[in-house]
Image (tube, helix red, strand yellow):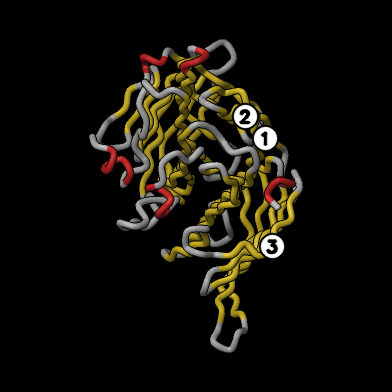
Amino acid sequence: MNSWYKLHHPEIFQGTLTEKNYFEGWYFKIVDNESENVLAFIPTIAINKNSNIYMSFIQIFDGINLDVFIVEYPIETFKSSRSKFEIKIGPNYFSTNRIKLNIEREDIKIFGTLNFKNLTPLPKSFLFPGAMGIFTYLPFMETYHGIISMNHKINGKLIYQDTELNFKESSKGYIEKDWGKGFPKAWIWMQSNHFFENQRSFMLSIAKIPYLGINFIGFLCFVWDREKFYKFTTYSRANLKSLRATKKRVGIIIENSKNILIINAHAGDAAILKAPTLGLMTSRDEESMSAIIKLRLYRKTQDQALKLIFDDTGFNSGLEVMNPQDLK
């Protein structure tokens, strides 16, 4: 399948297993209908030819118990479809609509199938084939980012550490991905689709981005609110008006030509996940899946006043803050 097709389908495997320094990982967030089980499954490949590292693994994050497991498989067991998002790592299967897990090790056991429906992908066009918009077409970016579904329903069962977990119709999921050479040196990432308004989801990513010898602060922010999308991004000329951040608290004001979004996030308990640098999983990423995110979205009026669209709070939220002092 040619590279043009891949650019317009960022959910599928973007790389090859012959890359010099490369990683690609998909992030599946899974929350049951009672919010008693908050899990993330992160199937990943990581390659560094100089170190003769060829890794294929699944990182599992239990956001309630703060357990992190990394289950490795031979790189030869990684298989991907060339025309749609389907990958296999060992006996495990991941796609847009389903995951099947078959993991048994002394410290971790997970078996079962989860089905996804009513997915909420971002709107696409020729100029904006994915979350990164026109930046999708730029070569040599350190990291590329894609959003597969802002919100969807989950149905199925998992056996997790000998306990049966039931995911009914009101269970929720979120899927995104990253690929490239490695994560940036400084970033903030947050996400929630558990607001008081059921048909609402939010994600934001701010990073210090190196490109062709320069560094700039780039950001992506999307709000899905009852079938309507609001976009605040560097490439759409949105403005990051205010940023205050520590490892535990983040306050942001961001605006586009029509709207202003005020964000306040407070981290919950966190765990350490592995993150890529030049294809090596040697970096560390502290993530909370019990953060609280408060959003206020306003519409600008013709008389320069602001009209409140919604004021809501997200729970079971993901939050990562890495070197926030470098984002100023």
Amino acid under label 3?
Ser
Residue 209 in which image quadrant: top right
Query: Residue shown at 39%/32% (left/top)?
Result: 99
Q: Is residue 27 above or below residue 56?
A: below
Q: Residues within 10 Å of mark 2 (few under 14, many from 20)?
A: some
Secondary element at tag 3 = strand
**What residue lies at 76% left-to-right and 47% top-to-bottom?**
246
Q: Earlier in the sequence, mark 2 or mark 3?
A: 3
Q: Amino acid at mark 2?
A: Leu
> Which residue matches tag 1?
286
Is residue 311 visible in the rendered image? The answer is yes
**Which residue is the site of mark 3?**
242
Looking at the image, residue 124 sits to the left or right of residue 255; the answer is left
Disc 3 vs disc 1: which is toward the camera?
3
Q: Marks 1 and 2, Cα distance to the nearest angstrom?
A: 6 Å
Where is residue 236 drawn, in percent x and y?
A: 47, 63
Front residue of 2 and 35: 2
Is residue 140 rendered to the left or right of residue 304? left
Answer yes or no: do the residues labelled 1 and 2 have beta carbons within 8 Å? yes
Q: Is residue 151 at all visible to an observer of this figure?
A: no
Q: 161 above or below 320?
A: above
Query: x, y (%) of residue 168?
Result: 45, 43
Q: Are marks 3 and 1 in contact (CB under 8 Å)?
A: no
3 or 1: tag closer to the N-terminus: 3
| Amino acid beneath label 1 | Glu
User: Mark 2–mark 3 contact, CB under 8 Å?
Assistant: no
